[in-house]
Image (tube, helix red, strand yellow):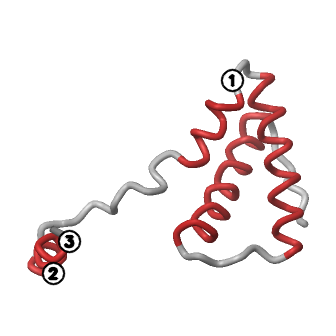
Amino acid sequence: MTTVVAASPRELMREHLRVLREYARQVLLKGEALTPRHEDDWAQRMGEFLAIGESFRLTPKELVHLVFRDLFKPAPRCGCGSCRAKNVSAE
């Protein structure tokens, strides 16, 4: 695991959030398993993320919501012919 050097707890929390969201995408959207090394990294980052967040008086529920927010939201489409065709087939 790589140690992140941050100037502030907020920056560290942002970095943890970015990586935790990527792990969530990998597992939940792509259906890929985390390697043992990544599982260890996930556990450490999640622990630090929750601890820092709680120091900012956020609840565990609010913190987990930050990780999963917009994860299952469909990607915006531009309106081109290809995107419109995908919209029709999805209905």
Give the mark nearer the N terminus: 1 vs 3. 1
Q: Please tell me the numbered disc located at residue 82.
A: 2
Find the distance from the CA under tag 2 to the CA under tag 3.
Answer: 12 Å
Give the mark nearer the N terminus: 2 vs 3. 2
Residue at x 62%, y 61% (from the top left corner)? 24
- Compared with 3, 87 (above or below) is below
Residue position for label 1: 58
Q: Of tags 2 and 3, which is closer to the observer?
A: 3
Q: Where residue 4 appears, x then y in whole percent?
A: 85, 54
Lateral position of residue 9 relative to residue 79, left or right: right
Residue position for label 3: 90
Q: Where residue 31 appears, x then y in whole percent?
A: 59, 76
Residue at x 85%, y 43% (from the top left corner)? 47
Q: Where residue 37 appears, x then y in whole percent?
A: 88, 72
**What is the three-letter code of the residue carrying label 1?**
Leu
Give the mark nearer the N terminus: 2 vs 1. 1
Lateral position of residue 12 relative to residue 20, left or right: right
